[in-house]
Image: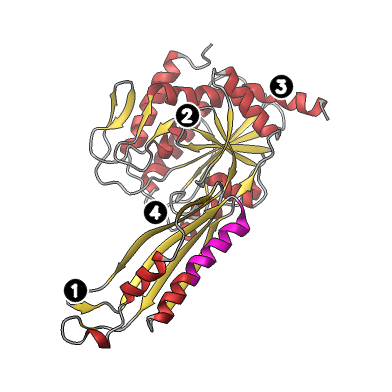
Amino acid sequence: MRRATDAEREQLARTFAALCRIESPSGRERQCTDWVAGELRGMGLEVEEDSAGPQAGSDAGNLMARVPGAGADSILICAHLDTVPLAAAVEPVVVNGGWENANDAILGADNKAAVAVALELARRLTGAGEPPEVGVELLFTVCEEVALRGAKAFDAGRLRSRFGYVFDHASPIGEVVVSSPTYYRIVADVHGRAAHAGIRPETGRSAIAAAARGIAAMRLGRLDAETTANIGTISGGTSANVVPEHCRVEAEARSLDRARAESVATEMIDHLQEAADSSECDLDVTLERMFDGYRTRPRELRVLLAERALRKCGYEPEQIVTGGGSDANALESVGFACTNLANGTERNHEPGERVSIDALEGMLEVAIALIEEAPAVMQETQAAG
C-alpha cells in the first residue's frame, strides 16, 4: 500500500526537476542552497546555514532544519547538494518511465533525487496537522563529491538524532550499506631534466618514463575482495621534441581494512620512488587520507529499522559492502551513527545518468516508512534488551 498520495508524487516530480535544472557543481552550490532553504522556510521551518563553506571550498555552507516530533527521538536524513561537473545544461525529461537529461550531460540525480525526497518528506510532515511521533533532522551538505568536504566540516555535535540515513548509493532500492572503505589519495610529482629529444636525449632525464616504470610495477584494479588501487591521471611534458622534466601522477587506494588501504598506498609510493631513483629523478609526494571507512553490525537498530521500512514498501533488504564513500563516512568518523541506503539511481557521474519514476517515488515511500516504523522498532529493540 502506498503511503504517498498522488499529489505528493506529483510534487516530488516537480521538486526533482526544479533541483536538477539548478547547476550546483562542487564549490558552486549557492543557488541550490538558497532554493532549498526557501522551500524549507516556506514550510514554516527554521533553517540554519553553517560557516563550513570556506573550509569546504564552497560558496555556500551546509543547511540544517528540524521537524519536531511528539517525543524526544528524532532521525537524521542527509543528502548532498553538489554534483560532479556538468558538460551541458540539465533539462530533465521523462523517457521510458525514467528521468534523463535531454542534453548530453549528467542529470544530477546524484544526489538531487535524495534532496527532493527529503524536501517532500518534510512537506508531508509539516502539513500533517500534528507532529510525527519521531522527529526529523534534515542536513543538506556541500562539496560531497570532492572527498566529503562539506560533511567533514560540519559540526556533528549539533545533531540531536540517535542515528541517521543518507540515500546515496547508485544501486537498486533495498540495498543497505554496512561497510565502506578508507580512501587514500596520492599526488606524486616526478622531476627530471629537460633536453632536446633529437639532439641531446642522453643529457635529459624523462620524468614521464620514470613515472611509467613506477606505474608498471604497481598492482592496480581489484587487489582483493576489500581493496582497490587506481591510477587516475598522468600528465606532463611540453612538446614531443623535449625530454619531459616534469610528470604528475594522481592515484588512489581504498580498502575496507584501514591498515590495508594505507599499506597499498605506501606500496604504490615505494614503486614510484624506486623508479625515480633508478632514473636519477626526484619525487615529491602528497599522501592524504580523504575519508575513513566504517563497518556496521548487522543487527544495529538503524539497520533493523531500514530493513523494516524497506519490507513495508515491498523491497527485499540486502546488506552490502561498497567501494564508494558518502557523507555517512564523514559522520561515522566523528561518532555519529549513519547508514547509507541505495537510492535506485543509475549510471551516476555519467552522461547517461537516469532514475526511474518508480525508484524516485520508492525512495519517498521508504523515507516515510522510516519515520512511521521508527517508534515500533525502537520499542521492540528496547524490550529485547
What's the residue at 57%, 62% (across, down)?
Answer: 262
Q: CA distance from mark 1 to mark 4?
A: 33 Å
Name the residue type under label 1: Ser
Q: Is residue 116 left or right of residue 72?
A: left
**Given contact means CB atoms under 8 Å apart, are the residues at marks 1 and 2 in contact?**
no
- Magenta stretch in the rendered image: 257-270
Is 310 or 148 nearer to us in this picture?
310
Dot 1 or dot 4, earlier in sequence? 4
* Residue 151 is a magenta residue: no
Q: Which residue is mark 2?
A: 172
Amino acid type at circle 3 is Ala
> Tag 2's secondary structure?
loop
Give the residue number, with chain letter if any, for mark 3. 376
Dot placed on the residue nearer the N-terminal end, 3 or 1: 1
> Which structural element holds mark 1?
loop
Mark 3 touching mark 2, by CB under 8 A?
Answer: no
Crowd tier of the residue under label 2, counting other residues whose Cα lies within 10 Å: few below 14, some 14–19, many 20 or above: some
What numbered label is drawn on residue 239?
1
Q: CA distance from mark 3 to mark 1?
A: 68 Å
Q: Residue at x 39, y 48 (%)?
A: 29
Left or right side of 71 for 145: left
Residue type, label 2: Pro
Kind of residue at disc 4 = Gly
| Distance Cα–Cα, label 1 vs label 2 | 47 Å
| Mark with earlier residue (3, 4) | 4
Pointer 4 local density, CA inside 10 Å: few below 14, some 14–19, many at least 20: many
User: Which residue appears at 53% of the width and 11% of the height?
Assistant: 1
Identify the colour scheme used: secondary structure
